[in-house]
Amino acid sequence: MRGCLQKAKTAKRDLRKGEASWNIILSLGRGADGKYKQKWVRFHGTRQQAEAKLTELVGQHDRGELVEPSKLTVGAYLDEWLATTKSRRATGTHRLYTAVVKNHLKPAFGHVLLQKLNVLHIERYYADRANIGSPARCRRASARRAEASGSQEDRDDAKSVLARAPEHAG
């Protein structure tokens, strides 16, 4: 197991009977700097619930779904993504990606921390685009690109946007 539980020292007045605060300590191995890495998560509940949460977090780590906190913005990520995809895409395709990122995505999301980007940001973007007369086909195309390039959660979100986008509007 790559983790353990530790009963946290907290005031008991905020907890129900049978519950406690737990520190879930995940062992992440050694980082790039050679130092031992841990992730601490505070959990309120019973020991069984804390053990279930620990198991869930270990599973997320093993599947690569547990993301380390970062100050990386969406704009910086998109710049990095464009640089890494340049050699794997046709020149025209990369030029199109660069134009979409520069003209649409970075102005809308560039300042947002990557870990804080959520469906609400994207929905707000689509609503703003609809208000300025962006054709529905453009919104659908943007959602298809997000569906093709993101994580499973991003693809699910894009599918829900595609399902709501009118076929023959705009």
Image (cartoon, rainbow, N blue to C red):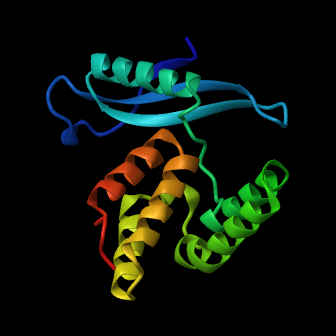
Q: Quadrant of the C terminus?
A: bottom left
Residue 35 to residue 165: above or below = above
Q: Which residue is painted at 56% across and 27% down in the image?
A: 61
Work out which residue is located at the far left of the displayed protein and give it: 17
Q: Residue at x 64, y 70 (%)?
A: 101
> At which x and y percent is residue 60?
50, 27
Q: Percent x, y for residue 166?
A: 28, 66
Instruction: Determine which quarter of the picture holds residue 71.
Output: bottom right
* 128, 22: nearer the viewer: 128
Which residue is located at x 65 percent, y 68 percent? 75
Q: Which residue of the protein is positioned furthest toward the bottom in this rendering?
A: 132
Q: Position of residue 37 (x, y in %)?
A: 69, 31
Q: Which is nearer the eye, 156 or 135?
A: 135
Looking at the picture, does residue 148 appear above or below residue 145? above
Q: Nearer the viewer, residue 6 or 82?
A: 82
The residue located at (20%, 36%) in the rendering is: 15
Name the quarter where the N terminus is drawn. Answer: top right
| Residue at the extreme front | 168
Estimate the x, y position of residue 111 in percent, counting from the top left. Answer: 58, 73
Left or right: 158, with 149 as reference point? left
Number of numbered tags placed on the structure image: 0
Name which quarter of the figure residue 63 lies in: top right
Left or right placement of residue 52 versus residue 1 in this view: left
Left or right of 145 in this view: 88: right
